[in-house]
Amino acid sequence: MDKSRLKKILDQVKSGKLPVDKATEQLKNFPVENLEFARIDHHRALRRGQPEVIYSPGKTDKQIIEIAGRINKSGCDAIITRFEESRFKAIKKVLKRAEYYPDARMVLILGGRKKKPALQTDTAVLVCSGGTSDIPVAEEAALTAWAMGCPVDRLYDVGVAGIHRLFNETDRIKKAGVLIVVAGMEGALPSVIGGLVDKPVIAVPTSIGYGASFGGLAALLGMLNSCASGVTVVNIDNGFGAGIAASLIAKSISRVEK
């Protein structure tokens, strides 16, 4: 349950349009709904401005449908991460408004009658990737930030192997309010971008690379040791975490009143 949904219930009670017992019924699972196999934190959307997010690996289709359905019923958007496209048909049969985003490996089910996430800030998030192979993680970050109410721009395949590709986009880089920079291999791109801008840079190491990249560990260590001051680093392949962090920063810079 988000702030607007709770406010609507309280306003209806105050005006006499909604009896107290019916309001109580709507709030009976607030803040926590216990499904035995999961305890849904319905208070999270009110407390943090984001609903619970479902990490799909390890969960059955039935569990995902139940959790997502309860989140959606509370009026919040339901987000499912790391979801395999082969499983989507089973979800779609029950959750009719579910939309699958294959590049991001995510499912988004909007609450209410929304056709897209409500804009919560006018501070733009720019997602950059070192290479095309980094796009799945970059798209996870981009879709997450968009679902959290941020305007999002993308700048892909601008890695250090052809640095002129990045310099051709200097204006777009400098216009962004927050930057998410996704890279594998040696993970150098965040350092380059971090030295060009006076905005927050969130670095995301990916597991893309040859043997000595150690599944993204080389990129992670390179980013942690960046000589560009102020570059912040999330975990390997954690596009979702970067998208959430970027949205929180963007909303702290500016907010769009609902």
Image: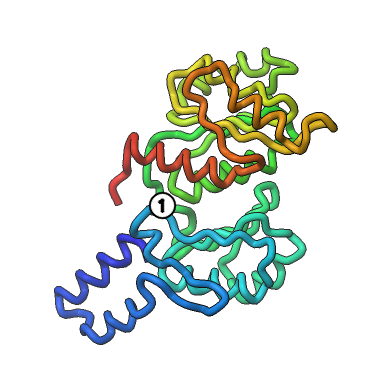
- Residue that protrudes farthest toward the bottom in the picture: 21
Q: Is residue 235 left or right of residue 122?
A: right
Work out whether residue 225 can be spotted: yes
Instruction: Residue at 43% x, 19% y: name it.
Output: 198
The vertical placement of 165 against 4, above or below, is above
Amino acid type, residue under disc 1 in the picture: Ala
The foreground one among 128 and 53 is 53
Q: Residue 256: x, y in percent?
A: 32, 44
Q: Residues within 10 Å of mark 1 (few under 14, many from 20)?
A: some
The vertical placement of 129 against 33, above or below, is above
- Residue that protrudes farthest toward the left in the picture: 15
Instruction: Residue at 67% x, 72% y: name it.
Output: 61
Q: Residue 14: x, y in percent?
A: 15, 74
- Residue that protrudes farthest toward the right in the picture: 211
Q: Is residue 148 left or right of residue 37?
A: left
Instruction: Residue at 56% x, 42% y: name it.
Output: 142
Q: Quarter of the image containing the N terminus?
A: bottom left
Work out whether residue 113 can be spotted: no
Counting the numbered discs, the total is: 1
Instruction: Residue at 73% x, 66% y: name it.
Output: 87
Q: How is the image coloured?
A: rainbow
The vertical placement of 96 against 169, above or below, is below
The vertical placement of 53 against 92, above or below, is above
Q: Residue 155: x, y in percent?
A: 61, 29
Q: Which residue is mark 1?
A: 118
Q: Residue 113: x, y in percent?
A: 44, 65
Q: Secondary structure at mark 1?
A: loop
